[in-house]
Image (cartoon, grey):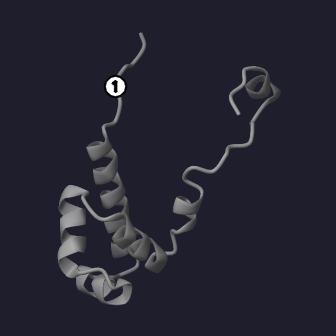
Amino acid sequence: MINFEFETPKDISKRIAENMRSLRKDRKLSMEKLAEISGVSYGSIRRFEGTGEIALTALLKIAAVLDCTDDFTDLFAKRTPKSIQEIIDGET
């Protein structure tokens, strides 16, 4: 049976927020300290962790502090084929 369940943008943003929270805690950073270091307001960080909502610029500032900017620079990069079949199928 084929699974037709897809993640919504809200689901994805909440998962990104959960990942960021986990990484922040692993690095022993409080929300207040992350706000101070990143220049993103405490309220924005708190809202992001609670709802997944944040401005892209603020998210990039947080990513820089947590050393995750490569995840963004590669976001829409052209993918290299993983197999000859992908090239034949035109999946590049």
Q: Check disc 1 and report the residue beneath it.
A: 5
Horizontally, is 59 left or right of 66 in the view?
A: left
Q: Position of residue 13 (x, y in %)?
A: 31, 52
Q: Quadrant of residue 47?
A: bottom left
The furthest residue to the top? 1
Is residue 22 in sight in this rendering?
no
Residue 87, placed above or below residue 61: above
Write the residue at 51% across / 68% down: 68
SS type, badge 1: loop
Viewer-closest of 19 and 78: 78
Residue 10, placed above or below residue 72: above
Badge 1 amino acid: Glu
Disc tally is 1
Packing grade of label 1 (10 A; few <14, some 14-19, many >=20) is few
Is residue 66 in sight in this rendering?
yes
Residue 12, placed above or below residue 33: above
